[in-house]
Image: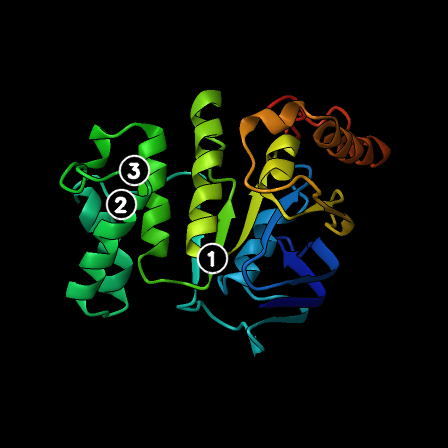
Amino acid sequence: MIHIEKLDKIFTTVRDERINALSDINLSVSEGEFVTIVGPSGCGKSTLLKILAGLTPATRGNVSVAGQPVAAPRRDIGMVFQNAILFPWRTILDNVLLPAEVQGRPMKAARSRAIDLLKMVGLAGFEGKYPAELSGGMQQRAAITRSLVCDPSILLMDEPFGALDAMTREQMNLDVQRIWRESGKTIILITHSIPEAVFLGDRVVVMSPRPGRISEIIEVTTPRPRGLDVMGEPEFGRQTSHIRKLFYRMGNADDSAISGEGIS
């Protein structure tokens, strides 16, 4: 589904300084796979997602989706950001329908799909509410629904739970796992939480400090579906500990952006 080969990204500052954000990224993601990415602040995780989404170009290398090069935003890719970014003057249903309006989709079918999706994420009955009337977790569910309304094959999620409290974040992890299982989407999710990465992912991609490289890819062996109780199991602890040790070896043991304690 997704193929990245020898990807580099270099930014040039206003002072004509070159910043190497990503270096020699090679990664393939299968259809229906859930891949999580974890790494220290500034390692290029979000930049990688923006390149995949067609929002920014790579400097070198190849990025393809379903065999086609990614050169611009695609209709088969949805994106969820850390903040829900809902328009306060639009109802939840109207916020969810926005991508369908922008893409000129048939609105009757889009409206029906939006209502079904809101029901799937537990927001049935909130279609006519405004963002300010919903909790943070409910707003993020609406944002996820918005990203799915045009039925993309791929969902890119850039630290979607970073602004939520710990209990809401745990529930959102369960919700996203369920949405992924029910929708069959290919998901790539960035997180600063090691336990979250292991809990959600089929594989965890561990990135190095800038310039961001793939340090290791860990296959998650915990069976699905996963409940929160798996975090107390020895194998889950072994895998989170292994990733944490990778960061120690890379000199990021004290990086506050890498969370190893719970889903936070």
**Residue 55, percent across and down?**
48, 62
Marks 3/2: CA–CA distance = 6 Å
Marks 3/1: CA–CA distance = 18 Å
Q: Which residue is the site of mark 3? A: 122
**Image height of 2 relative to 37, above or below:** below
Is disc 2 surrounded by few (<14), some (14 to 19) or many (20+) residues within 10 Å? many
The answer to whether any part of residue 37 appears in the image is yes
Per the image, label 2 sits on a secondary structure element best described as helix
Instruction: Tell me the tag on residue 118.
Output: 2
Instruction: Tell me the tag on residue 184.
Output: 1
Q: Is residue 241 left or right of residue 85?
A: right
Q: The C terminus appears in which quarter of the rendering?
A: top right
**Image height of 56 relative to 144, above or below:** below
**Which quadrant of the structure image shows residue 221?**
top right
* Residue at x 61% of width, y 23% of height: 262
Per the image, label 1 sits on a secondary structure element best described as loop
**Image height of 78 relative to 260, above or below:** below
Name the residue type under label 1: Gly
* Of the image marks 3 and 1, the number of the one nearer the N terminus: 3
Q: Is residue 252 left or right of residue 224?
A: right
Q: The N terminus appears in which quarter of the rendering?
A: bottom right
264 vs 231, nearest the viewer: 231
Do the numbered discs 2 and 1 sit on residues whose CB atoms are within 8 Å? no
Is disc 3 surrounded by few (<14), some (14 to 19) or many (20+) residues within 10 Å? few
Mark closer to the observer (2, 1):
1
